[in-house]
Amino acid sequence: MRKKFLRDTIYVIETNIDDMSPVIYETVFEKLYSRGALEVFLTPVQMKKVRPGILLTALVPKNKLKKIAEVIFRETTSFGMRYYEAKRLKLLRKTGEKKEKLGKMRVNKGYIGKELVKISPEYNDCRKIASKKNIPLHEFLS
């Protein structure tokens, strides 16, 4: 019997920050991704004394927890973080190639069992073609 979905377990790491310059986040993101984070995102939050803050969240493979935590401690003003396990369901994925009138690009295909349910162009390929042909990127991604 073929699986319908892929399943795995990751860690979700979160820390609230209200005292760091926003220009630092780009470097934080780069370092988190280079150390193995699967996804990194920021959410605006209201903190104590009604101060605006940022919730920094990183989704990480279980074997990368210590590396990611070290980046957060070294590169942000955070003194602590929360982490917890999260189970995931993912589509079965295959990578293919698609020929467009503007050029060849890689595409990600998502399946439920044997049924193709999503096709998504590879962002970096779209970006290169758009730049080379001098056309708006949104024409590929709409």
Image: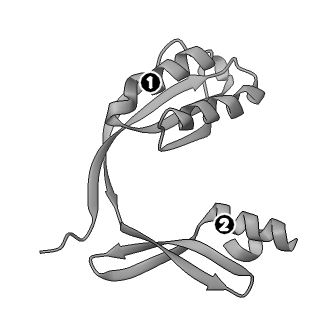
Which class describes the residues within 10 Å of circle 2: few (<14), some (14-19), or many (20+)?
Answer: some
Question: Which one is in front in this view, the residue at disc 2 or the one at disc 1?
Answer: 2
**Residue 124 sits above or below residue 24 on the image:** below
Q: CA distance from mark 2 to mark 1?
A: 30 Å
At which x and y percent is residue 115? 33, 83
Q: Given the image, on which type of amino acid does mark 1 rest?
A: Lys
Image-based side of 27 in relation to 86, left or right? right
Tell me which label, 2 or 1, sits earlier in the chain. Answer: 1
Answer above or below: position of 109 versus 14.
Answer: below
Query: Residue at horizontal 72%, vertical 26%?
Result: 24
Give the image quarter of residue 4.
bottom left
In the displayed structure, 97 sits above or below 40; it is: below
Q: Secondary structure at mark 2?
A: helix
Taking the spot 70% from the left edge, 34% from the top edge, the residue there is: 26
Give the residue pinned by disc 1.
67
Residue 45 seen anywhere in this rendered image of the structure: no
Q: Secondary structure at mark 1?
A: helix
x%, y% of residue 36?
A: 47, 37
Disc marking residue 125: 2
Who is closer to the viewer here, 18 or 35? 35
Amino acid type at mark 2: Asp
Image quadrant where one finds the N terminus: bottom left
Query: Image quadrant of residue 67?
Result: top left
Q: Nearer the viewer, residue 98 or 16?
A: 98
Q: Which mark is residue 130?
A: none
Q: Position of residue 52 (x, y in %)?
A: 69, 27
Query: On the rendered structure, is 54 left or right of 59?
Result: right
Q: Is residue 46 visible?
A: yes
Residue name at image x 26 percent, y 76 percent = 113
